[in-house]
Amino acid sequence: MAHEVPGVIARGKGAQVELTTIVVPDPGPGEALVKVQACGVCHTDLHYREGGIGADFPYLLGHEAAGVVEAVGEGVTGLTPGDFVILNWRAVCGQCRSCRRGRPWYCFSTHNAAQKMTLTDGTVLSPALGIGAFAEKTLVAAGQCTKVNPQAKPEVAGLLGCGVMAGLGAALNTGEVGRGDSVAVIGCGGVGCAAILGARLAGASTIIGVDIDDRKLDWARKLGATDTINSAKTDAIEAIKSLTGGNGADVVIEAVGRPETCKQAFYGRDLAGTVVLVGVPTPEMTLELPLLDVFGRGGRLKSSWYGDCLPDRDFPMLTDLHLQGRLPLEAFVSETIGVGEVEAAFAKMQRGEVLRSVVVF
Ligand code: APR
Ligand code: ZN
Ligand code: ZN
């Protein structure tokens, strides 16, 4: 049996998204059908709509979601109807070269559903990041469902499925922030603010938020920044140094995705420190640095893909910390909206008015 449900699609490059009827198959072997309860609006959804990720239109958007398992296919173990889950886009394969070397967080062959969701005329949909959750129901690989404590609110828990996890993981996993470290976060949107929260959770003693928008700096302070810098008014590198004894921060997290902010991260970092790039650049961007500085300043320059997370390890743990009051993830939910309001949410995101708009069903 197939399910006809409302879903939000991007039909072609640059076209406004539309709410339409999609057809979701019953789960086959290794798959799960999930009743979506909430799904955050992420930049990547907008990038899909703009044709920045691929040309496999129409896309079924949405990928930052929580919901309840409705049915599972043959051979699925450890997941049953009624389970409360966060959807992930890193269902590790266990068999690729990275998994076999004990680094599953880089898995190069992650699982997605084998069957396709379609429009009512049979047109095959490409689900965003292999999820597609601006829809009442979606079909994923069973491994894309991570069970977490059902006491968490779906609109909050779902955020761990993408942007908030990317930021938390940039600090906790990729940057390996430790107790007493100094950390600077450049770009205090949803991802950067989550990195600030991650740095606080890890015990960083100095946490510097850098942005060109004072509203974002207010959010950064609420989430744990001890100091903030408006880099439209003050030189970011000098200001980071003056807040860290003249040295620079132990870890600098770049959460914008631009060459000039990468340079600020590079030079705002102490000798032998770590730069984490979690902001996503566009194809035409390049970065030029004196090679002697790259060598002479030492340390590590790392990209953070999805916060280097392992969903089964990180989602339940972070949900529990949230429920204990130690991780105020609710601060990221700027508004909840209906499934017909995704286009309006993109506009608010572009104007910088929200940390996250979350569609609730
Ligand atoms: N210097 C400092 N901050 C800047 C600059 C700049 N030159 N340009 C933009 N910013 C700030 C914006 O003011 C905003 O607060 O960067 C922040 C970006 O935040 P959002 O637009 O909310 O984006 P977010 O969801 O946080 O994602 C940030 O991470 O995962 C990636 O694709 C994502 O590249 C994006 C980045
Ligand atoms: Zn793998
Ligand atoms: Zn995302």
Image: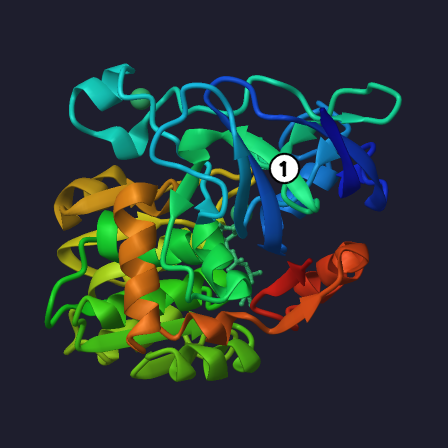
In the rendered image, the vertical position of residue 213 relative to residue 37, given as above or below: below
Nearer to us in this view, 300 or 319: 319
Horizontally, is 305 left or right of 284 in the view? left
Question: What secondary structure is found at the residue carrying circle 1?
Answer: strand
Decide if residue 267 is in sight here. Answer: no
Horizontally, is 103 left or right of 68 in the view? left
Nearer to us in this view, 291 or 254: 254
Quarter assignment of residue 100: top left
At 22% across and 60% down in the image, what residue appears? 251
Quarter assignment of residue 316: bottom left
Nearer to us in this view, 265 or 148: 148
| Farthest residue, direction right | 121
At 45% across and 30% down in the image, what residue appears? 142
Give the percent coordinates (x, y) of residue 349: 66, 63
Residue type at numbered disc 1: Thr
Which quadrant would the N terminus be assigned to in this image? top right
Horizontally, is 185 left or right of 178 in the view? right
Give the percent coordinates (x, y) of residue 167: 38, 57
Nearer to us in this view, 144 or 301: 144
Give the percent coordinates (x, y) of residue 49: 73, 40
Give the percent coordinates (x, y) of residue 92: 34, 28
In the rendered image, the vertical position of residue 54 relative to residue 173, given as above or below: above
Disc 1 marks which residue?
Answer: 138
Quarter assignment of residue 356: bottom right
Which quadrant would the C terminus be assigned to in this image? bottom right
Decide if residue 98 is in sight here. Answer: yes
Residue at disc 1, CB closer than 8 Å to ligand 3: no
